Image (tube, rainbow, N blue to C red):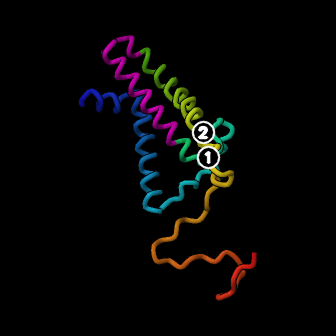
């Protein structure tokens, strides 16, 4: 357990550990209703990275998880092969650069089937925060109370 904690809190894995903590905090905020899962969709063009078709938060979460897992696994493997010295100092920057690239490629591969399953409008998501319990439903037009919407 000590090796795992040490590897997760040293360079290069530390950057991905912090990103994983941020992602976990974001999803906890989504779970309690403080934030909408699609709140970043208008700000980031995920299509340019090949990650479009699903909410940006999902793409970034998967990318972060894969980069963290890849960098942690590489550091743990390296720990057994070259525990200290010059080899480890030279490979740490390579792991730091390779982990996000591998995470991005893995995310592109994992997101592809999700694109087909999600409806086209699901990516944008609602822009209003989820209603709290007991709140009255919002009206979405110039309707008067008691008047039904014509279809």
How packed is label 2: few (under 14 Cα within 10 Å), some, or many (20 or more)? few
The residue labelled by disc 1 is 117
The residue labelled by disc 2 is 113
Instruction: Residue at 67% x, 44% y: name it.
Output: 45
Q: Where does the magenta region start and end?
A: 61-89
Position above or below: 132 against 66: below
Asked if one can make out residue 124 in the rendered structure from this viewpoint, the answer is: yes
Q: Is residue 4 left or right of residue 120?
A: left
Please state the horizontal and vertical placement of residue 27, each as a whole percent of the image: 45, 52
Instruction: Residue at 47% x, 71% y: name it.
Output: 132
- Seen from the viewer's position, the closer of residues 86 and 133 is 133
Please state the horizontal and vertical placement of residue 51, each as a whole percent of the image: 62, 39
Please state the horizontal and vertical placement of residue 82, each as a whole percent of the image: 33, 12
Mark 1 and mark 2: span between their CA atoms?
7 Å
Instruction: Residue at 52% x, 66% y: name it.
Output: 130
How packed is label 1: few (under 14 Cα within 10 Å), some, or many (20 or more)? few
Please, what secondary structure does the residue beneath circle 2 have?
helix
- Seen from the viewer's position, the closer of residues 135 and 119 is 119
Please state the horizontal and vertical placement of residue 49, each as a whole percent of the image: 65, 36
Q: Quadrant of residue 60?
A: top right
């Amino acid at each position: 357990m000590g090796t795992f904690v040490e590897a997760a809190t040293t360079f290069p894995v530390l950057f991905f550990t912090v990103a994983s903590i941020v992602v976990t905090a974001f999803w906890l905020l989504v779970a309690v209703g403080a934030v909408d899962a699609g709140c970043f969709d208008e700000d980031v063009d995920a299509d340019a990275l090949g990650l479009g078709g699903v909410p940006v938060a999902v793409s970034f979460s998967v990318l972060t998880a894969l980069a963290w897992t890849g960098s942690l696994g590489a550091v743990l493997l390296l720990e057994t092969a070259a525990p200290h010295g010059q080899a480890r100092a030279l490979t740490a920057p390579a792991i730091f650069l390779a982990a996000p690239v591998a995470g991005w490629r893995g995310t592109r591969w994992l997101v592809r089937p999700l694109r087909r399953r999600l409806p086209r409008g699901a990516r944008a998501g609602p822009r209003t925060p989820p209603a709290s319990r007991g709140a009255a439903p919002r009206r979405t037009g110039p309707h008067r109370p008691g008047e039904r919407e014509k279809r």
